Image (cartoon, grey):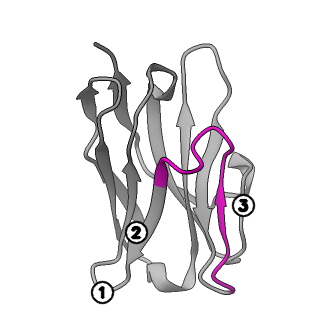
């Protein structure tokens, strides 16, 4: 059984930082493309960042470039999203996802596995 479990969300002030984690079991993360998506109220789920281990390519949404960093620890089978200089518009539920074709994916329909989501709220 494949499980992706996010943690690290919470309430943070504008300009602050959070580090999201996604612990994965049931698959070997090293052989999958991984990504972070977010869903804000009144909006569609959007890709935040993605990394494909097959060719080492990385994607960041324009809105988070220079502020967010995706990484993975294959030994721990865990995915991370370091979020710095957070803004109120980053408020959303953040989901981790994995793609078995191991290519960059920016549409939710391309994900094969999903986590349950973790709430991030940026507010003063």
Vertical position of residue 32 compared to residue 63: above or below = below
In this image, 2 relative to 59: left or right? left
Q: Which residue range is magenta in the image?
A: 55-68
What secondary structure is marked by label 3?
loop
Q: How far across and how far down the image is residue 32, in percent? A: 57, 77
Marks 2 and 1 sit apart, C-alpha to C-alpha, by: 19 Å
Q: Residue 15: name its quadrant.
A: top left
Q: Is residue 77 visible?
A: yes
Q: Are marks 1 and 3 in contact (CB under 8 Å)?
A: no
Instruction: Tell me the residue at 33%/16% (across/down).
Output: 123
Q: Main secondary structure of the magenta part?
A: loop
Q: How far across and how far down the image is residue 67, in percent? A: 48, 47
Q: Is residue 62 magenta?
A: yes
Marks 1 and 3 sit apart, C-alpha to C-alpha, by: 23 Å
Q: Which residue is under mark 3?
A: 105
Q: Which residue is under mark 1?
A: 75
Vertical position of residue 94 compared to residue 110: above or below = above
Q: As rendered, which of 115 and 50 lies closer to the eye?
A: 50
Q: Earlier in the sequence, mark 1 or mark 3?
A: 1
**Looking at the image, is mark 2 or mark 1 nearer the viewer?**
1
Density class for disc 2 (Cα within 10 Å; few <14, some 14-19, many ≥20) is few
Instruction: Tell me the residue at 30%/41% (across/down).
Output: 17
Density class for disc 3 (Cα within 10 Å; few <14, some 14-19, many ≥20) is many
Instruction: Tell me the residue at 36%/31% (across/down).
Output: 120
Q: Which residue is under mark 2?
A: 1
């Amino acid at each position: 059984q494949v499980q992706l479990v996010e943690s690290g969300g919470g309430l943070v002030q504008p300009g602050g930082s959070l580090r999201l984690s996604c612990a994965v079991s049931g698959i070997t993360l090293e052989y999958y493309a991984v990504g972070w998506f977010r869903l804000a109220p009144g909006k569609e789920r959007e890709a935040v960042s993605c990394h494909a281990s097959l060719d080492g390519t990385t994607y960041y949404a324009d809105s988070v470039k220079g502020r967010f960093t995706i990484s993975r620890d294959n030994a721990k089978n865990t995915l991370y999203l370091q979020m710095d200089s957070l803004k109120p518009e980053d408020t959303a539920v953040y989901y981790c996802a994995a793609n078995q074709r191991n290519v960059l994916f920016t549409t939710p329909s391309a994900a094969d596995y999903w986590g349950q989501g973790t709430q991030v709220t940026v507010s003063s």
